Image (tube, rainbow, N blue to C red):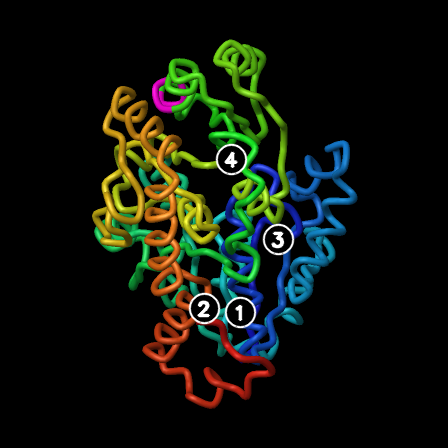
Amino acid sequence: MRVVLFCHSLLSDWNHGNAHFLRGVVTELSARGHAVRVLEPEDAWSVQHLLEEPHGVAALNEVRAFYPRVRPERYTRDSLNLEAVLDGADLVLVHEWTPPELVRRIGEHRRDGGRFRLLFHDTHHRGVSAPDALAGYGLSQYDGVLAFGDVLRDLYLEQGWARRAWTWHEAADVRVFHPHPRNREVRDLVWIGNWGDDERTKELDEFLLEPVHTLGLTARVHGVRYPAPALRALFDAGIEYAGWLPNHRVPLAFSQARVTVHIPRRPYATRLPGIPTIRPFEALACGIPLVSAPWEDTDGLFTPGQDFLVARDGAQMRRHLSTLVADAELRHAFAEAGLRTVLSRHTCAHRVQELLGICQSLGMSEDVLHPQSPERVLA
């Protein structure tokens, strides 16, 4: 199958979590024998910010080494020959961070005789936080939408934004995210996350800063876009701020801590239940015990209380963290359970299999969907 993917960037994950899952999907499709072509804009702001980091160029080179099958082509508005790019494609995936004008142009190409299947991929809370903007994308020429949660899928159908929609959750790229030896634990807690433009300021105080400070835990935070007041709050809580961390280095960071936490942004916790975002998948794939701030697993992805612990408030977060830090056997039990669930249900290989099933329902033939694979497919 010849696949064309339009996205913001796969080269950079600087404040750009969508790159995580899509890198894994591109790698998995390629490993199964599919030809994947990735297009991203030359002026992608995530790449620009990455290159401004002190070791940004080195990180970019590491990305190419970690993801040898991911080779994006960078285009400008004037240089993109859309007809040539789409010529011969079997499947075109358009991520929702693609410029709206280009989203429409691709749909018009399909309307005017394009023979490929065309799917829009949504991994953001814009459906509830900026519905007017999303409604303006004009997806009438698309075969359907891949939404990363049931509630978002239903929203597309209820609002008439798409003719068809499927739930396509994100998942862990287990080629990169897997357990490392844990005999070098040097701190109690690590959290990987950006400040969040005030979308979770209160939650970070309640579920991270205050528990770490009260319990006297050794903790480190990685992320970007921390304003001066946020940095001061970390310092006052006794938390080390370690700046941006390229995503492929996160598994090593997890291996050096006893526990991590998940603190979803407010739109996901309150208006898009069932969508945990990518971080819990990656943490559990790395075999680190996880304590999450509240989010409702309405889509039945995990078994809360078995795969990870849920803290309903700051007091419960303190109790959970205190217990886990003190009990190595309990940490091991949660780590094993979470990892087992990810490997059985939530890898990029599982999601590619789901994607191929969707394509089959759209009439694509078996010989296109299942070419000879150059390597064994990961479970």
Asked if the residues shown at circle 4 and circle 3 are in contact, with their CB atoms under 8 angstroms apart, the answer is: no
Q: Is residue 105 magenta?
A: no
Q: Assess disc 3: are there few (<14), some (14-19) or many (≥20) residues with their C-alpha within 10 Å of its C-alpha.
A: many
* Main secondary-structure element of the magenta-colored stretch: helix
Spot occupied by residue 148 in the image (x, y as percentages of width and height): 36, 53
Q: Relative to 323, is 49 on the left or the right?
A: right
Q: Nearer the viewer, residue 302 or 70?
A: 302
- Depth check, mark 4 against mark 3: the one in front is 4
Q: What element carries label 3?
A: loop
| Residue found at x 63% / y 33% | 244
From which residue to which does the magenta span run?
203-207
Residue 113 visible within the image: no
Q: Mark 3 or mark 1, which has the lower sequence index?
A: 3
- From the image, tell me which residue sits under label 2: 349
Spot occupied by residue 46 in the image (x, y as percentages of width and height): 63, 40
Q: In which quarter of the image is residue 81?
A: bottom right
Asked if the residues shown at circle 2 and circle 1 are in contact, with their CB atoms under 8 angstroms apart, the answer is: yes
- From the image, tell me which residue sits under label 1: 28
Q: Mark 2 or mark 1, which has the lower sequence index?
A: 1
Q: Compute the Cα span from label 3 to label 1.
A: 14 Å
